[in-house]
Image (tube, rainbow, N blue to C red):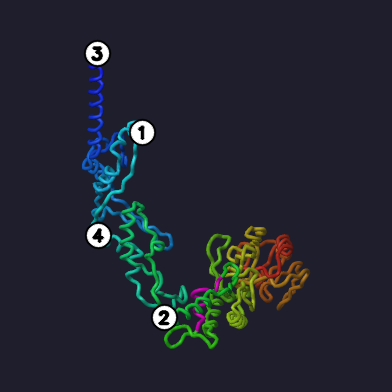
Amino acid sequence: MKKLCRFVVRFLLFGLFLTVAAFLLLVLYYRNNFPVNTWINGVYCTGKSVEEVNQELSARAEAPVVHILDEEGNVYPVDLAGTDYEADYTGPLERFIHQQNPLSWMENMMLRQSHELLPEFSFDEEKLRQLLEELEPVRQEAEKEDDVRIHYSETEGWILENGLEHRLDEELLFQRVRECVADGSYEVDMEQSGCIYDLSPSAWQMTLLALWEKVEEFQQCGIVYDMGDQMMALQGGISGSFLTVDQSGLPLLDEAGEPVVDPEAVKSFISLLAEEYDTFGKEIRFRSTRGDVIQVPGNGTYGTTIDQEAEFDYLMEALEGKRQEVHIPSYIRQGVVRGKNDIGDTYIEVDMTEQKMYYYVDGELTIETDIVTGHTGRRRGTPQGVNFVYNKQRNRVLRGPGYASPVKYWVPVKGAIGIHDASWRSEFGGEIYKTDGSHGCINTPTEAMAQLYEKVEVGTPVIMFY
């Protein structure tokens, strides 16, 4: 019995010895190899050496793309694959193993251990600099001058080129890119990272900057011309053209430090405004009901003419008072619709070739009728042009050399020429006007004339053409 007890004790001691020996061997093993159930950056590392894990991680590693943000939020990607980028995990892996408790392998048996490590890296610095030099902000920086300039553009007005502000420190940007790769953020905000800075202006540059503040305030003119079909803000190239310049070509300030307005420049603007928007006396292009585009001569009575003298007085006073308002121009004469197309959608169309008259209201055809216009065989043809209804009368006797014609409806459009009924005619349209036309008026069937008289308003445009 005693021999059996001694055998059991010896067996247990031997088993304990083997267990302790195996445990110590595992402890020694995992001092230089990764513990059981260990994963790094998605790679299974258990029992592997630093060199083996580094090979796997480096093979998987892709060159990162660094995103550089400018002040306006634009993003510029820089792919470090173009810099011969290489990732090396040797150092981080060795530090990882040395920081591990060799006894912790037992804990790993129950739970998977996942870790993320950043590599140590290398790349060709010259190639990185070349990639950065291709970025738009860096190219712009290379083009900047350490100076302040004010110059005029016909489209934008006076422009400030300030080469002192928002400069880019290219060397610091290079360092920030290195840092963001090292910490794994892969993003650089140029402004927040301190890459953007300003230069200090000289005394003359400070003078130019003070002048620019006055010019820019003037150019942000609050006057808006309401031209009917268009709103015209007097800003930028328009208001900037009003300024008087000195011998150096810079805007001139008065004794109060305010920009000096050039009256001749204001007159020139108003003249150009009238040239663009005046329609009176100008030929117009008109799409007829028959489908073609007609060139209607500018010898009618209808149209718009801006009062240039009144507008000059207004604008000089408004600019001096720094007004902020919407302004409708003064007119010597004005159509029923303001704008370049002052005929609008309500008008009478007299097609003297087709011997037809049409009345449109808000773009819809409401009256269509045959007519008889002036006798072209006797050189009394109805004149072409854009005219307008300037009166309406009932029961009028039309008189002329050798005739007196009573009419029920009289709608004059140009001098003694008008639209009226012609009860003495039994036929209208065709080519009657060539052999038995009127003295110049537009003869219209009584029924159609009654409708027109009732609906048409004084001021309505009348487009007359062959």
Query: Is there a contact, CB below 8 Å, between mark 3 and mark 2?
Result: no
Q: Position of residue 97 (x, y in %)?
A: 27, 42
Question: In the rendered structure, which disc, 4 or 3, sits on the residue that comes first in sequence?
Answer: 3
Which one is in front, 266 or 301? 266
Q: Which residue is mark 4?
A: 125
Span shown in magenta:
232-243
Disc number at residue 297? none
Question: In the drawing, does residue 205 fall left or right of residue 40?
Answer: right
Residue 241 on the magenta segment: yes
Nearest to viewer (mark 2 / mark 4):
4
The residue singled out by tag 2 in the image is 205
Location of residue 454 by image quarter: bottom right
Disc 3 residue type?
Lys
Real-space Cα separation, disc 1 to disc 3, in angstroms = 45 Å
Q: Which of the two discs, 3 and 2, sits closer to the camera?
A: 3
In what element is the residue under mark 4? helix
Question: Residue 343: percent from the left, percent from the top?
Answer: 61, 67
Q: Which residue is mark 3?
A: 2
> From where the camera sits, is residue 157 visible?
yes
Q: Is residue 403 above or below residue 54?
A: below
